[in-house]
């Protein structure tokens, strides 16, 4: 199989950065181009959610450095993510060809890859993001959802609590990181039922409490099947939820015709028709 050429550093001593996605499922989601970036790097940093996937990555490159140990209960994730950027940039500045490998898509709900690329470019280094198959992509396939049918909003669950946002219940609502919703310290690995109850109270302004909520976990190993649980919104606080699950609310209301704009379009259509006849 041929792939488009990798970006070449202008000279051998100039560092460069590629942040690539590993996809969600071990062995089946890695693109040929992402694999080339990994194999041709001098040093590889791994931000993966699964130890087995990290072992698989070690078979592709002799110098894989895990970013996982920088996470600690009680330590702000922002501090961890800044450390990741510094670790990556130290090697880029030393003239290395660096590859950061992140599970799913490296640019979806992932701060460090965007920041590292921005920093590298600001310092004059070549930097590139290579997309991967994200939890979102798997969710559409496994749950049979087409985001184009009714529209689809995505929110980091805590952001819904921290800020005033407008939910459109005529479309799908996808909530990320519900397992740690409401954590303002950024230092907890999970929050409990009381925090999820705050989320349910907010959602109940737009959805009935018996509305179906889908709790989804895509497969990360080829031997696994996706896990799909359907519960009533009122029960969301009381079901066990892991950090690797995404919550989907199907639409609760039908699409409403915008009569004012339809009238404007009618008038335009008539004008066009009249102009064509004339
Ligand atoms: C920090 S984000 C990383 C997302 C990742 N970059 C991607 O492309 O999917 C973590 C969130 O992704 C979602 N997630 C992670 N693994 C998942 C899985 N196996 N199935 C479904 N959602 C998952 C959850 O909402 C989780 O809280």
Image (cartoon, rainbow, N blue to C red):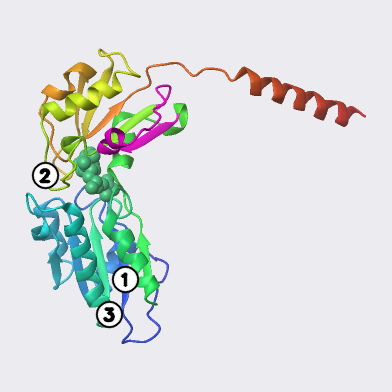
Tags 2 and 3 in contact by the CB under 8 Å rule?
no
Label 3: few (<14), some or many (≥20) within 10 Å?
some
Q: Residue under circle 2?
A: 188
- Residue 142 in percent (x, y) is at 28, 33
Q: Toward the viewer: 11 or 68?
A: 68
Label 1: few (<14), some or many (≥20) within 10 Å?
many
Q: Residue at x 23, y 23 (%)?
A: 200
Question: Does label 2 or label 3 sit earlier along the sequence?
Answer: 3
* Label 1, ligand 1: CB separation under 8 Å: no
Q: Which circle marks residue 93 in the picture?
A: 3
| Vertical side of 264 occupied by 34: above or below | below
For the residues carrying marks 2 and 3, which lies nearer the camera in this image? 2
| Vertical side of 91 occupied by 30: above or below | above
Which quadrant does the C terminus fall into?
top right
Question: Real-space Cα distance between discs 3 and 1?
Answer: 10 Å
For the residues carrying marks 2 and 1, which lies nearer the camera in this image? 2
| Vertical side of 14 occupied by 99: above or below | above
| Vertical side of 101 occupied by 120: above or below | below
Q: Residue under circle 1?
A: 17
Tags 3 and 1 in contact by the CB under 8 Å rule?
no
Question: Is 14 displayed left or right of 267 in the figure?
Answer: left
Ligand 1's quadrant is top left
Q: Tell me how many marks there are.
A: 3
Question: Real-space Cα distance between discs 2 and 3?
Answer: 32 Å
């Amino acid at each position: 199989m041929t792939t488009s050429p990798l970006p070449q550093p202008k000279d051998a001593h100039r560092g460069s950065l590629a942040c690539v996605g590993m996809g969600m499922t071990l062995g089946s989601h890695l693109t040929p181009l992402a694999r080339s970036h990994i194999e041709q790097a001098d040093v590889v940093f791994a931000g993966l959610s699964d130890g087995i996937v990290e072992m698989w990555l070690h078979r592709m490159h002799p110098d894989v450095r895990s970013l996982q140990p920088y996470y600690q209960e009680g330590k702000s994730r922002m501090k961890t993510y800044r450390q990741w950027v510094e670790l990556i940039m130290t090697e880029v500045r030393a003239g290395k060809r660096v590859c950061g490998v992140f599970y799913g898509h490296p640019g979806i709900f992932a701060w460090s890859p965007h920041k590292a690329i921005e920093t590298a470019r600001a310092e004059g280094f070549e930097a590139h993001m290579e997309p991967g198959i994200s939890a979102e992509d798997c969710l559409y396939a496994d749950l049979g959802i087409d985001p184009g049918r009714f529209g689809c909003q995505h929110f980091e669950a805590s952001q819904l609590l921290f800020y005033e946002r407008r939910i459109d219940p005529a479309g799908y609502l996808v909530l990320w990181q519900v397992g740690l919703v409401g954590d303002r310290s950024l230092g907890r690995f999970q929050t409990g039922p009381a925090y999820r109850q705050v989320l349910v109270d907010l959602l109940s302004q737009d959805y009935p409490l018996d509305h179906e909520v889908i709790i989804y976990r895509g497969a990360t190993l080829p031997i696994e099947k996706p896990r799909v649980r359907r519960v009533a919104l009122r029960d969301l606080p009381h079901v066990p939820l892991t950090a690797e699950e995404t919550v989907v609310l199907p639409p609760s209301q039908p699409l409403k015709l915008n009569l004012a704009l339809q009238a404007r379009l009618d008038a335009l259509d008539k004008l066009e028709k009249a102009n064509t006849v004339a």
